[in-house]
């Protein structure tokens, strides 16, 4: 993976993150996805045993800075 350090708030936007991800090669993208999968499984090893997600009756609110 490409290692760079950025301190700009502009690098934290979803668009900037998408551009970064799109700049990776297919192999690098797969490495990132495998890393996150391994991370999720290390936190909750029972994830593969869970049933499909069910719809919630509670509302979901997504917040973002304008």
Image (cartoon, helix red, strand yellow):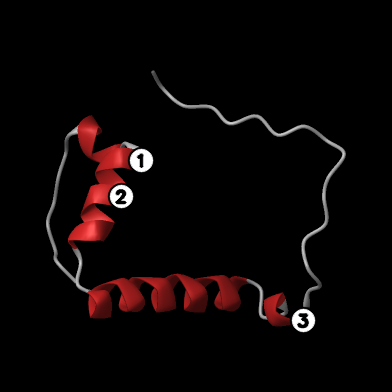
> Mark 2: which secondary structure?
helix
Residue 7 coordinates in the image, percent (x, y): 16, 39
Q: Residue at x 25, y 80 (%)?
A: 27
Residue located beneath label 3 in the image: 49
Q: Residue at x 26, y 76 (%)?
A: 26
Marking on residue 48: none
Mark 2–mark 1 CB contact (< 8 Å): yes
Residue 65 coordinates in the image, percent (x, y): 41, 22
Mark 3–mark 1 CB contact (< 8 Å): no
Sequence-first disc among 3 and 1: 1
User: Horizontally, is 6 left or right of 54 in the view?
Assistant: left
Residue located beneath label 1 in the image: 14
Judge by depth and name the residue closer to the eye, 62 or 8.
62
User: Horizontally, is 32 left or right of 56 in the view?
Assistant: left
Quadrant the N terminus occupies? bottom left
> Mark 1: which secondary structure?
helix
Residue sitting at the far right: 57
């Amino acid at each position: 993976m490409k290692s760079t350090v950025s301190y700009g708030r502009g690098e934290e936007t979803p668009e900037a993150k998408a551009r970064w991800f799109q700049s990776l090669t297919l192999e690098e993208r797969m490495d990132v996805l495998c890393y996150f999968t391994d991370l999720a499984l290390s936190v909750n090893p029972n994830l593969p045993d869970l049933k499909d997600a069910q719809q919630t009756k509670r509302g979901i609110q997504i917040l973002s800075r304008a």
